Amino acid sequence: MGKLVILKLAEGNFEQGFPVTLQIGDENVRPSVEITGALPPNPEILRDYYRWQSIYRNLRLPSRPIGLPKELNQAPSLEDCQQVTEEFKVRFNTWLAADSFRPIREKWLEKLIPADNIRVLLQTKDLRLQKLPWHLWDLLERYPQAEIALSAPAYEQVNRITTTSDKIKILAILGNSQGIDTKADQAVLNLLPNTDITFLVEPQCQDLTDQLWEQDWQILFFAGHSSTHQTNEIGKIYINQTESLTISQLKYALKKAVERGLQLAIFNSCDGLGLAREFADLHIPEIIVMREPVPDRVAQQFLKYFLSAFARGNSLYLAVREARERLQGLENQFPCATWLPVICQNPAEMPLNWGELFRDTPNLPTSLSKTTAVKRITNRLGFSSLLLTSMVMTGILTGVRYSGRMQPFELGAFDQLLRLRPPEKPDSRLLIVTVTEEDVQAQKQEKPQGSLSDKSLAQLLEKLETYQPQVIGLDIYRDYPVGKDYPALAERMRKSDRFVAVCQLSDSQAGKPGVKPPPEVSPEGLGFSDIAVDSDNVVRRHLLSLKPSPSSPCTTPYALSVQLALRYLYAKGIQLQFSPDGASWQLGSKWLLSKRIFKPIEAHTGGYQGVDASGHQILLNYRSPGSPEAIAPHITLGQVLTGKLNANAVKDKIVIIGTTAETFHDYWLTPYTTPQGKLQAIPGVFLQAQMVSQLLSAALDGQPLLWTWPLWGEVIWIWGWSFLGGLLTAYLHRFTYLSLAAGIAFTSLYGSCFIFFIAYSCWVPLIPAMLALGGNILIVTTYLNIKFKNKF
């Protein structure tokens, strides 16, 4: 989308200065930036301009003015004009570099980049300001896609009839041609494609008004003599050898023409700012005039350059800029030719595009229609070229993805999809007993070595086992023996078949020595607490098993969550089985049609690329009943010890004991977010509950595990969206249609990934497919633009 810059110069004068307001925003939306400044007093600017104007108008040039008498007895030379031109340019830019105007300049540089397509509207009713050559502003020259237009402070949009046909309707008025060659203008117009031109050669006033009243015109063109009376700032055109008209004398006919679709007026004649000022009251969308008397050859060349660029598909603004800059080649003979053309814009209207003026038909020659030219180019592209570009794009993205550079973005997309899933009910098969900060403080007199003292643990286990839980998991490190005062606790930990304790494996690469298990617990009653954490410290993977190092103080190969889930499932008649190759686990009840297969993550799985996939890992399918901490019913240690525990909450359940006290730093980041938008951290005991719940849900409820496609499936998926992007660009030639189709495609892509994730628990590549779709749209658009420009 292009940028719209509005520079409003309020009432003022060169003796006192001008208040200035700058607005910047995207096209067709409200400005997003507004700032004020001021142009300081500088009467010399006006004096220098009039000096330049006097010299320019007294040059002996073949031009199109009438009624502009020569003021000097001796005609100035081209060198005189060039010298005063350079002096004025320096003074003009010095004025625009004033301190009071600096906020305007700095905000412009902050918000706009040279690559932006920029329309600049200068809103002022001061004719003297309109006459100044604003294109000389050094700031504008930094932006090759920018062009400035004049605009009246008061404007409105006219409700007009907008029609399109196979031809663009142009009314071309060739007025008084005394001393000039208007036939050259006629010849240039006749070369335009897809046009229906009516020429009025030196018409009578009645003929002109009849044509304006009786037909629908889209473009009004005038070539001949014109002038602006400086006293009342009224423009006049000379339509034949004896008659001249002001715009006000054509007011009703022109007003009707605007209402019936007139969108552009081109006055390829002298001194046209007065014409533009009168036309502003009619609210025509756009006008092109010459600021000063224009030499005949300059007028002809400008018309040729402008219409060529405009019909080629450039916007009106960029077409005027291109034509204006090409006039520089004439300035050795006709100085300041680039100063002359200027656009006058109705701010309520969007800029005109040649292709919007007519309806394309398939029978038109290729050289006559931009749309048809693009179609021919598309046909030359063919499916083979579209296939090639989409395959190249897919190969590049697959390589970048394999290197791991997309992993942060893909994991972010994974998190978002996870958060969008509908909430589930808490898992009633679990009960979490939390040791809170208050519980820790209450045990201080017992001098515990950790968050849970021997006395509290003994009381807790005694109360829990009274209600017959299926299994009890202790997610608290106890690398020390039970005190001598609690032999019953040591005996219970040693002999209980429903008690599982935790330890930590050593990791020499990470510098972790590991944590020893409780001495009283046998190896069969242990589970490790190690958790697979991604590079952003978020837990998205579930580590099921890992071969411990021979030097590790913790020698159990299974995670605590696995030990708890298997004991619970064993009571239900479900045992862990392995695939014939031993690579996958199998769990499932006899009521399920098929057993759940726990296929391990590999180094390159889905959005994970080059991840440490040691051991047996799967994606962690969080159960989220609103919050990951609401995974299951929970009760505090203090509540249990004071008799507030309900027997039904324990019987035949998995009880997990862990600390939530912040002083023990057992918190882990999840893909979920807090109301403040930050990633939510949950205590380790809730994370263990999430992992246990995933295993139970898969084995007993048939809940699918999160899975990904094989590499070849993901490559085909990415390629398909890349090919679609190229196809849309090749066959939708209008920007509006392409933008709409691209928006629908991106929405469909996101929706498809969301449905796969929600309905089938499949993590489908979203970010690579989006880049493939958008990248191929950009590539094919660039290719067609280059090819199209070469056609004209």
Image: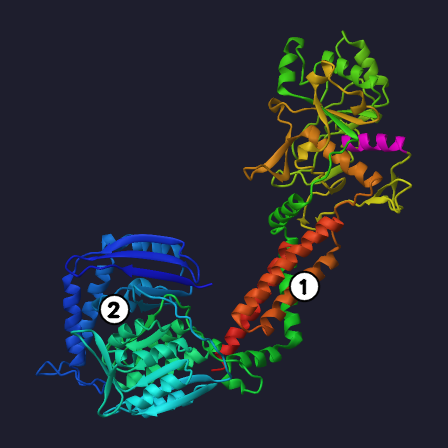
Identify the magenta region: 559-572
Residue linked to disc 1? 719
Q: Is residue 90 left or right of residue 720?
A: left
Q: From where the camera sits, is residue 334 visible?
A: no
**Principal SS element in the magenta part?**
helix
Q: From where the camera sits, is residue 363 visible?
A: yes
The residue shown at (42%, 78%) is: 260
- Could you tell me the amino acid type at mark 2? Gln
Q: Secondary structure at mark 2?
A: helix
Front position in the image: 277 or 444 = 277
Q: Quadrant of residue 429?
A: top right
**Residue 130 image label:** 2
Mark 1 crowdedness (10 Å alpha carbons): few <14, some 14-19, many ≥20: many
Asked if residue 225 lies in the magenta stretch, the reply is no
* Residue 470 versus residue 741 in the image, above or below: above
Residue sitting at the far left: 73
Q: Could you tell which of marks 2 and 1 lies nearer the N-terminus? A: 2
Q: CA distance from mark 2 to mark 1?
A: 54 Å
Q: Quadrant of residue 348?
A: bottom left
* Residue 567 versus residue 705 in the image, above or below: above
Residue 232 spot, x, y in % from top left: 18, 73
Front position in the image: 327 or 554 = 327
Front position in the image: 735 or 395 = 735
- Total marks drawn? 2
Q: Is residue 574 left or right of residue 748?
A: right
- Could you tell me the amino acid type at mark 1? Trp
**Residue 618 image label:** none
Asked if residue 561 lies in the magenta stretch, the reply is yes
Residue 781 spot, x, y in % from top left: 54, 70
Q: Secondary structure at mark 1?
A: helix
